[in-house]
Amino acid sequence: MELSDRDLDLVSVLCDGLPLAPRPFQAVGVAIGMGEDEVLGRLQALQQGGVIRRFGVIVRHHELGYRANAMVVWEVPADALSAVGRRLGACPEVTLCYSRPPRPPAWPYSLFTMVHGKSRGTVEEAVAVLAEREGVAHYRHELLFSTRRFKQCGARYQRRMAAE
Amino acid sequence: MLVLDDIDRRLLDLYQRDLPLVARPFAAMAEAVGVGEDIVLARLARLSEAGVISRIGAVFRPHRCGHSTLAAMAVPAERLEEVAAVVSAYPQVNHNYQRDHTLNLWFVIAAADAAEVAAVMTEIKDRTGIAVLDLPLIEDFHIDLGFDIRWS
């Protein structure tokens, strides 16, 4: 799906999320001179076109009692990456699953998954169970627990103002 | 920690995806949950203030309407605060975590285009004197249905 300038305007004002008002889409549209119907129509199209993956309440795991999270990184050879990625990406314990370029020798890992749990122990156990069940335990992997959150907010795709 | 009751839980269980795209979404949610629109608005405001909700809005598929990368740095322990503050101050940085590893600072840079992402990364390296590992996404394998919260 190709995004128009109007779509990008809408994406840009949506980065902060909806205001908690009875007609939030109307309020969002005001900032970019877009009517409520157009906002809703474009959002539906963006969702159907796969640009918006989900639209809803974005929760913070930590505040819900999921105090432990590990970025679990796997050294998966290139020829197996796609199959292993799809397999882990479909697991209920996994909340993110991306392939990224390995940077050897310092960083050999090619597949990144995120696992949340109420404690470090439950995350370690969940990863061990997952690795065994999905047949990926033989790939070298590491758990990188987060020990401190310095910043967490939504991605901002602000467009720089075009020169007049 | 905030105590969440049945109304809060149902809002979080039902609306992490597929928030009704209608003129009055909170009224539609209220009807489904069996309370008034004002209650839904008040609950969502309370959850936002408590930090349980970061926002109500869209999760975009990466690289469809902007550019982003995951970056990592190996920061000496005594400089962690200072370097983390430099990184967090960029509006383009949306997540910044310390992790238990030699590469101990992990953050996401997102901007309208690749050049802006690269510029932020170079600036962070120049200002801190520490190399920044660039780990851009190649493929997204996750099917995002929101988070299945175990309430017990």
Image (cartoon, coloured by chain):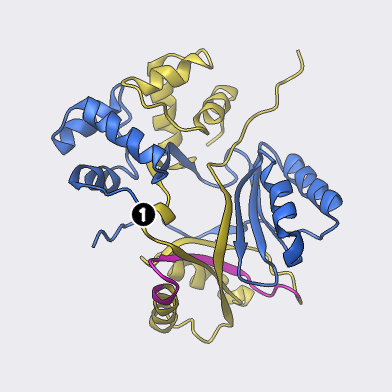
Chain colours: A yellow, B blue
Q: Position of residue B14 (x, y in %)?
A: 26, 45
Magenta part of the chain: A106-122
Q: Position of residue A155 (x, y in %)?
A: 57, 41
Q: Nearer the viewer, residue B74 or A91?
A: B74
In the image, taking residue B52 as reference, residue A109 lies left or right, namely right
In the image, taking residue A112 as reference, residue A54 lies left or right, namely left
Q: Which residue occupies 53% across, 87% down?
A: A138
Residue B45 vs B130, above or below: the answer is: above
The answer to whether residue A49 of the structure is visible from this angle is no
Q: Which residue occupies 56% across, 33% down?
A: A2
Q: Position of residue A6 (x, y in %)?
A: 55, 22
Q: Position of residue A135 (x, y in %)?
A: 44, 83
Q: Which residue occupies 77% across, 46% down?
A: B118
Looking at the rendered structure, the secondary structure element under dot 1 is helix
Residue B55 vs A4, above or below: the answer is: below
Q: Is residue A117 magenta?
A: yes
In the image, taking residue B19 as reference, residue B105 lies left or right, namely right
Residue B112 vs B79, above or below: the answer is: above
Q: Which residue is mark 1?
A: A64
Q: Nearer the viewer, residue B125 or A7?
A: B125
